[in-house]
Image: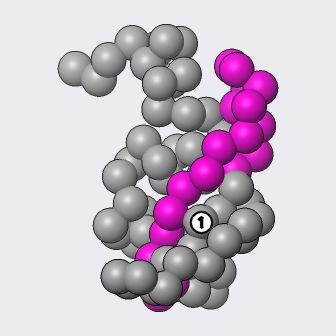
Amino acid sequence: MKVIEEVYSPNHTYIVETKPCFHCKEVGTVEIPSQELFDLNQGKLIQEALVSVPKELREQILTGTHPNCWIELFGEEE
């Protein structure tokens, strides 16, 4: 995960680049509030640190798999 942009308005966030998706091979980006990114970098578990980030985007941060690619591969959540 690499920070590619810092956004100051309306809240301080960072846009991070995720690793390439194993399905489509494209990199992606996810916007993360600064305090949550700090907590993640301090060693908190991703589900505890990134509380405002949807679970599909947390998966993208971990594996690179985009939410749409996940659905193509495994179908909708039941």
Above or below, 59 relative to 12: above
* Identity of the residue drawn at 69% across and 19% down: 23
In the image, farthest residue toward the front:
9
Is residue 36 at least partly visible in the picture? no
Q: Is residue 17 magenta?
A: no
Q: Which residue is mark 1?
A: 15
Q: Considering only vertical position in the picture, is 71 above or below 57?
A: above
Task: Write the residue at 73% across / 40% down.
Answer: 27
Q: Is residue 36 left or right of residue 28?
A: left
Give the quarter of the image for residue 19.
top right
x and y, in percent, of residue 62 in the image: 63, 50
Q: How is the image coloured?
A: one colour
Quadrant holding the C terminus: top left
When the figure is inspected, residue 13 is found, relative to residue 17, above or below; the finding is below
Quarter of image, res 60 = top right
Q: Residues within 10 Å of mark 1 (few under 14, many from 20)?
A: some
The percent position of residue 56, horizontal first and vertical second, equals 42, 42
55 vs 27, nearest the viewer: 27
| Amino acid at dot 1 | Ile
- In this rendered view, identify the residue nearer to me: 11 or 71: 11
Judge from the rendering whether residue 44 lies leftward or rightward of residue 51; answer left or right: right
Q: Position of residue 39 (x, y in %)?
A: 53, 84
Residue 58 seen:
yes
Bounds of the magenta span?
18-36
Q: Indicate the quadrant containing the N terminus: top left, top right, bottom left or bottom right.
A: bottom right
* Left/right of residue 16 with respect to residue 9 in the rendered view: right
Q: Secondary structure at mark 1?
A: strand
For the point 35% across and 52% down, the residue is 54
